[in-house]
Image: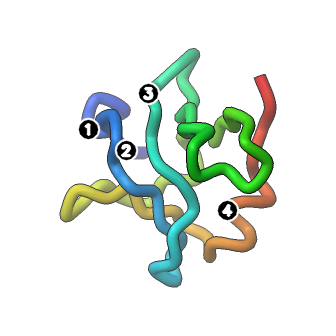
Amino acid sequence: MVDASQIKEHMEIVGSCGHHVGTVDHMQDGRIKLTKNDSPDGQHHFLPLSIVASVEDGKVKSSMNHVDTMAQFQNA
């Protein structure tokens, strides 16, 4: 599992395919809170830390493609 302290505000989240999923707002309750600015519905969403495969090159990379990653969106 990835160390949550590696995940920083404004990092891009990408699927394993490299496609954009969202932008980190901050970590909250062990989950990644995404900014609402680039959310498809204008709302904050959360992603479980368990979907993160790595943090490298300033990006949070999911273990799933962007479609499957977005299917993991959780509301508050």
Looking at the image, is mark 4 or mark 3 earlier in the sequence? 3
Q: Nearer the viewer, mark 3 or mark 1?
A: 3
Question: Where's the C terminus, which quadrant?
Answer: top right
Which residue shows up at 32% across the image and 59% down it? Answer: 59
Element type where label 1 sits in the image: helix
3D distance between C-alphas at marks 3 and 1? 11 Å
Q: Which residue is mark 3?
A: 26
Looking at the image, is mark 4 or mark 1 earlier in the sequence? 1
The amino acid pointed to by label 3 is: His
Q: Nearer the viewer, mark 3 or mark 2?
A: 3
Task: Measuring from the top left, give residue 12's x and y in whole percent.
Answer: 39, 56
- Farthest residue toward the left? 57
Looking at the image, is mark 4 or mark 2 earlier in the sequence? 2
Residue 29 as seen in the image, left or right of residue 76: left
Q: Nearer the viewer, mark 4 or mark 3?
A: 3
Q: Which residue is mark 2?
A: 2
